[in-house]
Image (cartoon, grey):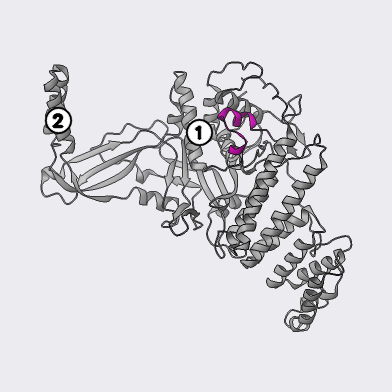
């Protein structure tokens, strides 16, 4: 097991915070420019990005510079109130209410946020809430002419609405709740439920990284492979390798709540202390700018697993990543509408090496994962394909070998040519062929990357596809496997291709920004029966329902949902970006989270 890490050298926290603050201010200024041009959607996008950057600034007890602390607060409030104004111009009043409520949590006496929330509440027909917010505005600033005018308009409307909505009687003159500026009465809060897992700290815009790391950690078969990579002690002051940093991270996540002399992994109230990913990020060779840029989760998984596989190969170990996650495809070509028995027998196959993840490109055209996979595996017709190409290439190679006088190569090529003639594979010149795709082998752990980004030529940028795309808890891919008796495929020792859903990585936002969380079905501590769905939202981990993890991640229309920018009218902006399925025969080895010591 890897040793505990050496504490990193102290850094100038104030300088780091000022750099992040400057980045947030720059994004806010871009939002102001778009607002002046009346390009309100772009303005709101930049205000959102600025708010997210400001939200990554963590103020520690060691920081005593009050100017920096005040600046962070001011920028955060400005981003929220400016965003609310842009959203109101877009008439997205649900989002205005949500954004202003965030600002009021930070500053309960923010007059701008209170007034803008009131106007949107009125547009949504929530007159009681609007009146309470306007009265709160007057409590903050009794001379506000805008609040007085708006409240008078609501009072004038009381008689018109009271007849049809008896429940509104008397509400417009009702004072706000004592000691509160919000309109709604206090609601009971469900008690927090302790969870056996630790979260991961967000180091900027690393929610996508945290979601992937939690997903990989909760696949014990992969975790064992990572712990098996040989590693050496890291001298003090030196940067650990990727393997060591990842092993240390997984080791910390694995510790039970009552371990760790320095408090790592201990329970704080009902939540375990989150684990830092800074050491792992440093092993990537990233700087602070990289941590503030979100990456495509599918591309990151591909590159990350590629790097782990290379580490394994460098140690002359078996290619376990390919064995556990590698998908093998087989393309089969046949002559379309063959004119003879000989041309009917012509078959050409091509196998692709193992790779991951399986990318789904048919989000808009298909209604779910099975329909998309069937579409991907459907046949296509390729015109004027040279069916004699392989045979002719071999003849060219034979001629080159004869010119060199290489007798061994000549004999080898002649044997191949003779075999092709014997099997009728010389080809029939240019023909229209029918090409089909099937899975030759499916691994125990199956990653699906749902490609929801599509390039928009009108805007010149990628846009997010928010169409509904369903996925099942159980997936049987038997019908998509190579099933031709003429094509030999060795039996799969990992069992039939029947899978159970293990995890869902969900993105909320739009094409150029947003937030990732991971929903993972995992077992709890030893002795606890069955697996539950957990939501891993950076440093916060909670138990959720299966409906939230699956059905609510389909995307598509959702009546009553708070609309967010880029989602379109009535469209969810929350949708799954990556799915992980596990073969039923491997479920026990995958869901058990306490199998290494």
- Taking depth in this image into account, of 263 and 596 the one nearest to the observer is 263
Residue located 44% across and 18% down the image: 316
Vertical placement of residue 10 versus 457, above or below: above
Q: Quadrant of the C terminus?
A: top right
Helix, strand or loop at mark 1: helix
Chief secondary structure of the magenta portion: helix
Q: Is residue 282 magenta?
A: yes
Q: Is residue 255 magenta?
A: no
Q: Earlier in the sequence, mark 1 or mark 2?
A: 1
Q: Position of residue 581 (x, y in %)?
A: 49, 41
Q: How many marks?
A: 2
Q: Is residue 154 left or right of residue 402?
A: right
Residue located 85% across and 68% down the image: 138
Vertical placement of residue 542 versus 591, above or below: below
- Taking depth in this image into account, of 245 and 373 the one nearest to the observer is 245
Magenta residues, as a range?
Answer: 275-290
- Assess disc 1: are there few (<14), some (14-19) or many (≥20) residues with their C-alpha within 10 Å of its C-alpha: few
- Taking depth in this image into account, of 181 and 597 the one nearest to the observer is 181
Seen as rendered, the residue at the extreme right is 178
Question: Marks 1 and 2, how far apart in space?
Answer: 41 Å
Q: Position of residue 409 (x, y in %)?
A: 17, 20
- Assess disc 2: are there few (<14), some (14-19) or many (≥20) residues with their C-alpha within 10 Å of its C-alpha: few
Helix, strand or loop at mark 2: helix
Vertical placement of residue 84 versus 259, above or below: below
- Taking depth in this image into account, of 239 and 423 the one nearest to the observer is 239
Q: Position of residue 463 (x, y in %)?
A: 49, 55
Residue on which the image places disc 2: 396
Residue on which the image places disc 1: 304
Q: Quadrant of the N terminus?
A: top right
Q: Position of residue 435 (x, y in %)?
A: 26, 46
């Amino acid at each position: 097991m890897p040793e505990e890490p050496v504490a990193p050298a102290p850094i100038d926290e104030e300088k780091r915070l000022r750099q992040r603050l400057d980045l947030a201010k720059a994004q806010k200024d871009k939002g102001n420019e778009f607002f002046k041009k009346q390009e309100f959607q772009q303005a709101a996008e930049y205000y959102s990005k600025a708010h997210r950057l400001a939200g990554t600034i963590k103020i520690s007890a060691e920081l005593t510079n009050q100017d920096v602390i005040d600046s962070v607060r001011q920028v955060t409030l400005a981003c929220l109130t400016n965003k609310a104004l842009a959203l109101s111009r877009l008439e997205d009043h649900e989002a205005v209410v949500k954004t202003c409520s965030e600002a009021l949590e930070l500053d309960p006496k923010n007059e701008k946020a209170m007034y803008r929330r009131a106007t949107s509440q009125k547009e949504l027909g929530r007159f009681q809430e609007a009146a309470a917010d306007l009265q709160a505005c007057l409590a903050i600033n009794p001379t506000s002419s805008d609040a007085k005018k708006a409240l008078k308009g609501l009072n004038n409307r009381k008689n018109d609405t009271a007849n049809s909505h008896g429940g509104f009687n008397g509400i417009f003159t009702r004072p706000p709740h004592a000691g509160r500026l919000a309109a709604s009465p206090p609601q009971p809060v469900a008690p927090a439920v302790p969870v056996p897992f630790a979260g991961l700290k967000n180091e900027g815009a690393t929610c996508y990284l945290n979601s992937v790391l939690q997903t990989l950690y909760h696949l014990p078969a992969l975790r064992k492979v990572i712990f098996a990579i040989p590693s050496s002690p890291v001298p003090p002051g030196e940067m650990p390798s990727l393997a060591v940093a990842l092993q240390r991270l997984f080791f910390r996540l694995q510790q039970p709540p009552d371990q760790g002399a320095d408090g790592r992994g201990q329970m704080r109230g009902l939540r375990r202390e989150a684990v830092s990913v800074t050491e792992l990020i440093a092993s990537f060779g990233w700087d602070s700018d990289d941590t503030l840029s979100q990456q495509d989760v599918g591309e990151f998984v591909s590159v990350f697993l590629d790097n782990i596989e290379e580490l394994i190969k460098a140690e002359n170990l078996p290619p376990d990543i390919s064995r556990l996650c590698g998908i093998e495809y087989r393309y089969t070509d046949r002559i379309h509408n063959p004119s003879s028995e000989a041309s009917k027998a012509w078959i050409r196959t091509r196998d692709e090496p193992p790779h991951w993840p399986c990318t789904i490109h048919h989000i808009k055209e298909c209604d779910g994962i099975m329909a998309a996979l069937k579409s991907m595996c459907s046949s296509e017709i390729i015109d004027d394909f040279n069916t004699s190409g392989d045979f002719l290439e071999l003849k060219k190679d034979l001629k080159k070998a004869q010119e060199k006088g290489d007798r061994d190569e000549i004999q080898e090529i002649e044997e191949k040519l003779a075999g092709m003639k014997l099997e009728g594979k010389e080809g029939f010149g240019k023909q229209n062929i029918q090409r089909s795709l099937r899975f030759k082998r499916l691994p125990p752990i199956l990653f699906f990357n749902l490609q929801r980004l599509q390039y928009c030529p009108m805007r010149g940028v990628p846009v997010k596809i928010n169409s509904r795309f369903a996925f099942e808890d159980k997936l049987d891919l038997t019908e998509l496997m190579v099933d031709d008796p003429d094509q030999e495929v060795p039996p799969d020792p990992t069992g039939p291709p029947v899978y159970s859903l293990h995890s869902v990585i969900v993105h909320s936002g739009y094409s150029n920004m947003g937030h990732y969380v991971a929903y993972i079905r995992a077992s709890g501590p030893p002795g606890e029966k069955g697996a539950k769905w957990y939501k891993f939202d950076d440093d916060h981990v909670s138990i959720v329902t299966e409906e939230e993890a699956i059905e609510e991640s389909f995307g598509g229309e959702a009546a009553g949902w708070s609309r967010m920018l880029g989602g379109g009218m009535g469209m969810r902006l929350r949708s799954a970006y990556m799915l992980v399925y596990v073969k039923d025969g491997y479920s026990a080895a995958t869901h058990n989270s306490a199998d290494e010591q």
